[in-house]
Image (cartoon, coloured by chain):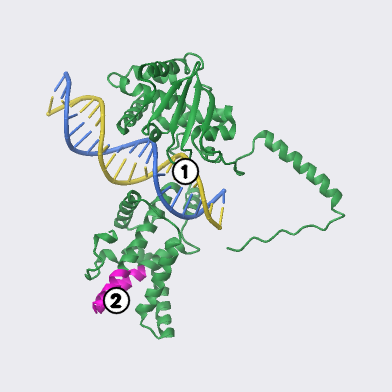
Chain colours: A green, B blue, C yellow
Amino acid sequence: MRSNSTPATKTTPPSPGDGLPEGLRTRYADTLANAHTLAQAEGLRFRVPVGVAQDRAIRAVLDEASASGANPSAATVAAYQRDHARLRAAGGTPLDHAGTRAHFDRLRSACRWVEADEIRRLRTLAETARKARDLDAMRGYTLAAFERAMVYRALYLAQDRPTWAQKAHAMRAAGLRQVSKSKRFAGRRALSPDRLLVALGQQPGRCARVEALAMVFALFGIRPAEATRGLAMEKTAIGLRLAVAGAKVDAVRGQPLRVLEVEPTRRGQSAIAVAFLRAYVDATGGDMDASRADVVAVRRAMRQVQPGLSPYAYRHARASDAKASQGRAGAAAWLGHSNDRTQQGYGHARSAKGAVTIKAATASRPVRQTKTLPPTLAERLAQVATRLAARTSSQSAQKASPPRRRTPRPGW
DNA sequence: GGAGGCAACTCGCCGAGCTT
DNA sequence: AAGCTCGGCGAGTTGCCTCC
């Protein structure tokens, strides 16, 4: 399917796989008929063969497609190709196949990328055939690229392209609900770190391997990927301090490095877990280097202790604790976010159980403040006070100045 | 706040390897 | 052979960000 799977220099006749799938051809019959009529008219108008007019239309679509700025890694492209091949075999569109918004996003991104690549490949094959004076092959490739480009525009570029909102509306109308896999709920009912430690101790044969790593997840709520980058832990007066090299970090996202500090609460909550890890620091020096297999073992063990329990469940649980005690900026630093908006997807401060005392979180980057988080009660009261003050002053000033007109928004 | 992009994550399945 | 653990893989989901 990939462009490099078929050398561009080889001019073989178009195979059925290169053309538009029949399902899409039927569904977009009107779009294709209009596009063909338009290409004929353009050809007559500019006195060029219809193939040249089709090629101009293909180029316009490819130019618009490349304006998205997408730049997926090799691994992502490979995943996109698998998604695209499956969808093409099934003969549907991303919206047909997707069951959730996230799934749609993934399939749309995949199909957008691979389809554009395929159209580009067909166009290159047409050009090669033209140079070889193989006119039948040239027309065949151009037609295939043209039809795929026209459906591409309808699916991904047009103003009225299908979006997830349409399907979500239809699903709501039909009384269908999406099943969320968020760990937010699992985080609310997650066992305390102490109870998890006891439960793991009752799992024969596995506990020695997973206990320490599981306690780090339970106490600090770090991401599994962060555990595999290497952790450094040390004792404080009565608690623990953990240095974390962040995952999901690039030039703008995430926190490259953060230091998290916890203290134990009572026995049954986190006192035993903290004591366990303090002993681990005494015995090993505090460095921890988990492999991917270690993380898988912890996931499996947690799942066995409680259905739905996972490192991310504890990430949600500790996020609630951090929100309750550290405020937005502190919670963002705790979670390794670069802004204070992303934490909206995590547990609410009122869900905090206080199983762990969050003492401090220090991140290597400052946390950006955003305006779109729901305001706290104090902020809402301040806003009301400001509005009341503004209303009072504007009523007195109204006679002096004419009402201001709103600046119209740019019409993009 | 919706749309879009991409990396990391979870889950289910399957086969290899080990023990009984 | 049956039962179990473990790790790899594919499919689908979630998280984290920007743009408009």
Image height of A216 relative to A388, above or below: above
Q: Chain of mark 1?
A: A
Q: Is residue A326 left or right of residue A313?
A: right
Q: Position of residue A10 (x, y in %)?
A: 22, 68
The quarter of the image holding the N terminus of chain A is bottom left
Marker disc for residue A251: none
A130 drawn magenta: yes
Element carrying mark 1: loop
Report the side of A9 relative to A319 (left or right): left
Q: Which residue type does callout 1 highlight? A: Arg
The residue wearing badge 1 is: A177
From the image, which quarter does the C terminus of chain A lie in? bottom right
**Which dot marks residue A139?**
2
Residue at 35%, 30% (x, y): give it: A299
**Badge nearest the viewer, 2 or 1:** 2
| Res. A100 in view | no
Q: Is residue A368 above or below residue A68?
A: above
Residue at 30 percent across and 55 percent down: it is A85
* Apparent side of residue A378 relative to residue A314 in the rendered image (left or right): right
Q: Residue A302: percent from the left, percent from the top?
A: 37, 26
| Quarter-of-image position of residue A287 | top left
Dot 2 amino acid type:
Arg
In this rendered view, identify the residue nearer to me: A82 or A73. Answer: A73
Task: Magenta stretch: give its range.
Answer: A123-147
The verdict on residue A235 being magenta is: no
Question: Residue drawn at (79%, 42%), measured in percent from left and top?
Answer: A389
A193 w.r.t. A138: above or below = above
Sort mark 1 into few (<14), some (14-19) or many (20+) by Cα contacts within 10 Å.
few
Q: Secondary structure at mark 2?
A: helix
Q: Residue A126, located in which quarter of the rendered image? A: bottom left
Q: Residue at x 53, y 29 (%)?
A: A361
Can the viewer see residue A130 in this picture?
yes
